[in-house]
């Protein structure tokens, strides 16, 4: 992890660059798989599963029996932990429900909006070294709260053609309606186009490698909604002399162990703090099981010494981190000056890990600077907000003449006529 | 307009197909212009403006003097009308503001979210036969309410190198910070990448032709957020014997006059209603100034006779119209059974034109079936919702052990360690 002392503002853009991701080179391969599944459905999925997951799957749909068995395979302790996380996530996301407010904008003109769950959604959960059941909670809980009727899940089978028991347990717990042993681009294709087995969905959620990311981009361009643009995970920490360096180092490593392309940024106005954190980092890194991954991620990472807290805030807002921990004097006030971040963690005890699993906030967040324009996943992500209006005779009399003028000025006589007829009450 | 009587459900998918839009063939041309502006900035914009708008522009930034003059060129009556529309749009969108609610998910664990305006946004307003100042209200009002600091606007200059006075007046009224005489793909490029003159923005809003749509898709794929996928405008009307056929016909035409690729769908369980509406349609069409456009749009359009109201609702939910007018018995109840639509207009006096201009709801809505997964523009579109959490020592003690278990089960020891250190309070 490189330390940069008092960088000039003119150098920030370069300094804060993310490791480049470019999916353009994959596009052709990904498009071929998408087209294959679109045309040949389940048959094509089987072929790709053989090719990429090295396993032949009879039925991709996970059976009731498999789900029941999975429940027995999970330890009681883990199930309790998952239940606690679910409860908190549910409580926080329930608070995001919006009441219908009928607004009379002009006498006789009532407008309101109503949130309606997206009927069919698909969740993608990557495979790999560990089962990401926490992401199932983060996506499945708001999906069910939103009232989505069909909530399907795709995840790649392991070499034995199975999904991890914790995946199946979490999926059942949140009320996923169908679980499929399908991974990669073929899973995205199945959900976007539908097959004989897999229902077509209107919006696809969930993380994935660069092939999955590219597939999501391509189906999005052709009409299927997706959660948000994806990118490697990242954390920024703003710390000063009041922080606990051991904690800060542990937080940086918790992010760095995610993947080799992860990035962590430590920002401080205190040189001593940076030194202490980096010392502690070395010690903790040495005993970390995922040391080799974290080490690579730390090569993309930086400790930045700035002149003041206000410079730190400015730099962080330019970086727009996915996660931000603020652990310094006046941390509450400083946190409110952040305008670009996915999720903010305030104080010594608010570690990112808490938000990753169980505090209640969502862990699917905008990376790669997208926090400048995107929000993380919330209940909003699983609903459409339909607007309504009801206008009385009096109402159209009140606003009709203004509308006639505007429609005419825009050269739209047909628009005007729809109002004129009502004003004349013909 | 073709009438289809009692179509079988199995034929609905074909029946409800939209006129196909395919921007793939434009992609190469659009990408060339984007790359040109990215590399050569303002110089490239000048060249493209000469080529496409047939005018040489000295300074693309509209001057204060031009804006003042525009204000004098608009009639007092039109200005008053625009002000009334602005007031209603502002009232409705203000009601969408969200209060910060601090939720204690577990004792000692507080989570909340805060809406923050996207710092820099760009509005695109197409040129063409008429000045679409109403769209400036629909985008500019929520942008300012959201607290966006930089709100720029691009619109193509006319042959005299000017923008319409109504465009400039509306832009000033809503508080647009900078107005540029730039149109087409080069405008999207300017806003996405920034030039010496045009500030780079984080999200681009607004309608446009298929080149603009394609440009928005491409910059979106590379990181700039956009409002929503675009497509030709459309209206469905559910009417029965209680409707006023003159009004229904006028509403269908108000949509049909938008463009040759517009589509209108009339759904009814009453054969007589359909006949009366179509008769009235013929009469009104004959005297419509934009008759030739509307005629073409009506070729894509259908009157569908169904067996019952519940079948009508099902069919409409499958179509997912941008606009839906419900004018029939029990219209309020029926409107609440709609799950896929952009905006719903209830009753005889709620014409689509009202929502297009001045009732208060937004007129930028999901077309092309996207209402299944997307909402129309609202205050939400101009903010990011940042989540926050503050956890006390007690809080981490309460949820920490569950987090440790989950992190371990996901194979992420570094995540676990960040919690363990805090539980041990080392």
Image (tube, coloured by chain):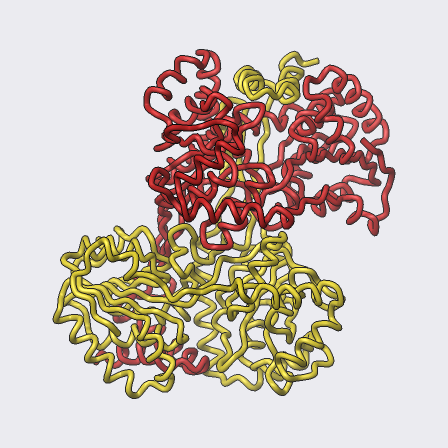
Chain colours: A yellow, B red
How many numbered marks, from 0 up? 0
- x and y percent of residue B262 in the render? 68, 34
Q: Is residue B269 above or below residue B368?
A: above
- x and y percent of residue A386 in the render? 57, 42
Image quarter (top left, top right, bottom left or bottom right) of the N terminus of chain A: bottom left
Q: Residue at x 29, y 73 (%)?
A: A252
Q: Is residue A84 above or below residue A331?
A: below
| Res A350 quadrant in image | bottom left
Of A65 and A304, the residue lying toward us = A304
For residue B353, side relative to residue B71 (left or right): right
Q: Is residue A136 above or below residue A57?
A: above
- x and y percent of residue A396 in the render? 58, 20
Q: Residue at x 74, y 18 (%)?
A: B284
Is any part of residue A164 visible from this angle? yes
Q: Residue at x 44, y 70 (%)?
A: A85
Image quarter (top left, top right, bottom left or bottom right) of the C terminus of chain A: top right
For residue B227, side relative to residue B297 (left or right): left
Q: Residue at x 60, y 76 (%)?
A: A156
| Res B174 quadrant in image | top left
Of A258 and B53, the residue lying toward us = B53
| Res A413 quadrant in image | top right
Is any part of residue A114 visible from this angle? no
Of B312 and B11, the residue lying toward us = B11
For residue B13, side relative to residue A75 (left or right): right
């Amino acid at each position: 992890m490189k330390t940069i002392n008092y960088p000039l503002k003119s150098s920030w853009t370069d300094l804060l660059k993310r490791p480049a991701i470019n999916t353009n080179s994959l596009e052709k391969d990904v498009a071929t798989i998408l087209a294959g599944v679109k045309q040949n459905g389940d048959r094509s999925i089987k072929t790709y599963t053989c090719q990429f997951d090295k396993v032949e799957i009879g039925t991709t749909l996970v059976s009731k029996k498999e789900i029941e068995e999975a429940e027995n395979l999970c330890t009681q302790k883990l199930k309790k932990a998952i239940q606690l996380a679910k409860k908190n996530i549910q409580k926080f996301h329930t608070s995001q429900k919006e009441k219908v407010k009928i607004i009379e904008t002009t006498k006789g003109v009532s407008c309101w909006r109503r949130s309606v769950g997206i009927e069919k959604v698909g969740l993608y959960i990557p495979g790999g070294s560990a089962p990401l059941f926490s992401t199932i909670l983060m996506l499945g809980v708001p999906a069910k709260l939103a009232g989505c009727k069909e909530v399907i899940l795709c995840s790649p089978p392991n070499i034995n053609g199975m999904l991890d028991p914790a995946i199946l347990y979490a999926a059942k717990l949140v009320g996923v309606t169908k679980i499929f042993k399908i991974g990669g681009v073929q899973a995205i294709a199945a959900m976007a186009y539908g097959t004989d087995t897999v229902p077509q969905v209107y919006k696809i959620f969930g993380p994935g490698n660069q092939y999955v990311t590219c597939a999501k981009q391509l189906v999005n361009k052709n009409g299927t909604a997706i959660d948000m643009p994806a990118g490697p995970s990242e954390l920024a920490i703003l710390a000063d002399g009041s922080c606990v360096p051991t904690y800060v180092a542990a937080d940086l490593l918790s992010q760095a162990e995610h993947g080799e392309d992860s990035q962590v940024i430590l920002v401080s106005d205190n040189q001593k703090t940076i030194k202490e954190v980096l010392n502690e980092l070395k010690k903790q890194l040495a005993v970390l099981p995922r040391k080799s991954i974290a080490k690579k991620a730390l090569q993309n990472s930086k400790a930045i010494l700035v002149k003041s807290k206000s410079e730190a805030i400015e730099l962080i807002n330019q970086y727009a981190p996915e996660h931000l921990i603020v652990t310094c004097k006046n941390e509450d006030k400083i946190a409110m000056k952040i305008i670009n971040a996915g999720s903010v963690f305030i104080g010594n005890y608010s570690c990112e890990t808490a938000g990753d699993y169980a505090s209640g906030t969502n862990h699917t967040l905008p990376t790669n600077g997208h926090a400048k324009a995107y929000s993380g996943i919330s209940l909003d992500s699983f609903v459409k907000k339909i607007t309504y209006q009801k206008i009385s005779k009096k109402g159209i009399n009140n606003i009709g003449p203004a509308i006639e003028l505007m429609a005419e000025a825009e050269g739209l006589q047909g628009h005007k006529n729809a109002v004129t007829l009502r004003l004349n009450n013909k």
